[in-house]
Image (tube, helix red, strand yellow):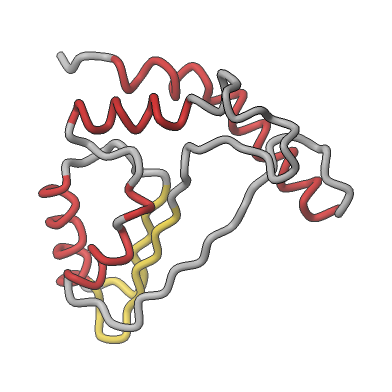
Amino acid sequence: PRFDLIHLRYMLGSFTEKQWKGVYEQAYNQLAPGGWIEQVECGLDFFSDDGTMPADSKMAGWGEMFYAVGRKSEKPMDIFRTMKDSIAAAGFINVQEKEYKIPIGQWPKHPIYKEAGRLALEQFMTGLEGYVFCPWMEPG
């Protein structure tokens, strides 16, 4: 069967670059004419626009630590940097990319960003153990 939509989310660190190529090619081959692929990934760079989080803080250093683990395992944790070009290379046309900043916590004044921040903090806190331990676990 062919699909109208293939959705990928938070797959960073799941595949090698070669495997990603296969994922996108398989998605392309399994979509019905006019079908759509959608991928949502996140960067692991923590920062503040207003300087309230110093660049040398421990949390600010997490991103590079995760990216280094991805390089070592050959399963990139920064797939958001390459997915647009990789999707296009698989044959998809009209590939678009949208980037959003997401607050962590309820500090924003705007109600939409306040709710997004609340949800992001909940996701972050409930998944923190997996985020921290899983990339360093050896298979088997």
**Residue drawn 69% across the image and 30% down it:** 53
**Residue drawn 66% across the image and 28% down it:** 54
Q: Is residue 1 left or right of residue 12?
A: left
Q: Residue furthest bottom?
A: 34
Relative to 46, is 3 above or below? below
**Residue drawn 40% across the image and 65% down it:** 38
Q: Is residue 65 left or right of residue 128?
A: left
Relative to 113, is 48 above or below? above
Relative to 8, is 106 above or below? above
Q: Position of residue 107 (x, y in %)?
A: 83, 38
Q: Position of residue 94 (x, y in %)?
A: 35, 83
Q: Is residue 127 left or right of residue 97?
A: right
Where is residue 35, by image quadrant?
A: bottom left
Relative to 133, is 111 above or below? below
- Quarter of the image with the N terminus in it: bottom left
Q: Position of residue 61 (x, y in %)?
A: 49, 25
| In front of the other: 70 or 134 | 70
Q: Residue furthest right?
A: 109
- Quarter of the image with the C terminus in it: top left
| In front of the other: 47 or 80 | 47
Q: Position of residue 120 (x, y in %)?
A: 65, 39
| In front of the other: 10 or 76 | 76
